[in-house]
């Protein structure tokens, strides 16, 4: 083969390779476009999914609030107690490093903690004087009744822990199960502090509301007996001004 022929062959080979390269480049561009379309589709699907999850959560929240209002409608003194306690509880939980963002059921539990009180007769629930042992036993049954009411409602999940265990005490003298220390679910230990803050800072027929500062002194005194010391340490980092703001907003 002559040099001229060799050169020509080389040019032809280069032309072939260039054509192949152009084709590959075109194919790659098409694939890229296709991938971009897939990515856009996925983004859109995620967005729709998020919107659906958000809407579902909103429906759950409205249902839970309606239920909580039904429970509270009987008791004019406590007003929007469940909503306030839920707000206090979320604040303390955040201070305790307990992320409730992933478990919205815990907030549902805060709102529905006293659902079981529907089974306590008015004559006992609103009795002005001290309760007899038999009446006390009926009142102390409300966490059990409440947890039974929500037992089969799947979306309430961890809310049941709060409903069942919100009257347990750190030292094991609470009810209904006499759980002690960390046997009590953390959400219920946080709730117990929030519930007491609201009880002490709300007017009751038998006593005037305390200030948040005075309530704090009383609650901290019960660290290790009624309350989990770690939850109390978290509560100590929460500013009374923030609690008072909730009190003003949710009257
Ligand atoms: Fe209760």
Image (cartoon, helix red, strand yellow):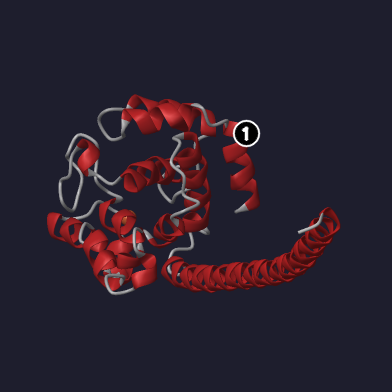
Q: Total of numbered circles in the picture?
A: 1
Label 1 beta carbon within 8 A of ligand 1: no
Residue at horizontal 19%, vertical 63%?
Answer: 138
Given residues 68 and 119, the one toward you in this image is: 68
Residue 71 figure quarter: bottom left
Q: Is residue 113 visible?
A: yes
In which quadrant of the rendered image does the N terminus lie? bottom right
In x, y percent, where is residue 167?
27, 49
Q: Is residue 229 above or below residue 32?
A: above
Q: Residue furthest front?
A: 2
Q: Which residue is mark 1?
A: 241
Callout 1: SS: helix
Side of 174 relative to 209 (left or right): left
Side of 70 relative to 3 (left or right): left
The quadrant of the picture showing ligand 1 is bottom left
Residue 103 figure quarter: bottom left
Given residues 161 and 144, the one toward you in this image is: 161
Residue at horizontal 43%, vertical 69%?
Answer: 74
Given residues 48 and 124, the one toward you in this image is: 48
Label 1: how many residues lie within 10 Å, few (<14), some (14-19) or many (20+)?
Answer: few
Side of 176 relative to 216 (left or right): left
Q: Is residue 83 above or below residue 62?
A: above
Q: Residue furthest right?
A: 4
């Amino acid at each position: 083969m002559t040099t001229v022929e060799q050169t020509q062959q080389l040019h032809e080979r280069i032309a072939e390779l260039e054509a192949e390269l152009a084709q590959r480049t075109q194919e790659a561009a098409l694939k890229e476009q296709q991938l971009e379309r897939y990515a856009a589709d996925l983004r859109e699907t995620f967005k729709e999914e998020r919107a659906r999850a958000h809407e579902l959560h909103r429906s759950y929240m409205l249902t839970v609030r309606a239920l909580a209002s039904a429970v509270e409608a009987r008791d004019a003194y406590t007003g929007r107690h469940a909503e306030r306690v839920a707000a206090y509880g979320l604040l303390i939980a955040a201070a305790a490093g307990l992320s409730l963002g992933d478990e919205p059921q815990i907030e549902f539990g805060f709102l529905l903690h006293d659902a079981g009180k529907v089974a306590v007769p008015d004559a006992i629930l609103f009795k002005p004087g001290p309760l007899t042992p038999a009446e006390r036993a009926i009142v102390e049954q409300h966490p059990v009744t409440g947890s039974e009411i929500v037992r089969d409602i799947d979306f309430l999940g961890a809310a049941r822990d709060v409903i069942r265990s919100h009257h347990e005490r750190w030292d094991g003298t609470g009810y209904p199960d006499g759980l002690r220390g960390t046997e009590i679910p953390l959400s219920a230990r946080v709730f117990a502090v929030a519930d007491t803050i609201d009880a002490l800072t709300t007017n009751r027929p038998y006593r005037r509301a305390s200030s948040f500062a005075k309530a704090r002194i009383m609650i901290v005194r019960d660290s290790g007996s009624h309350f989990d010391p770690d939850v109390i340490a978290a509560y100590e980092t929460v500013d009374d001004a923030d609690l008072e703001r909730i009190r003003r907003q949710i009257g």
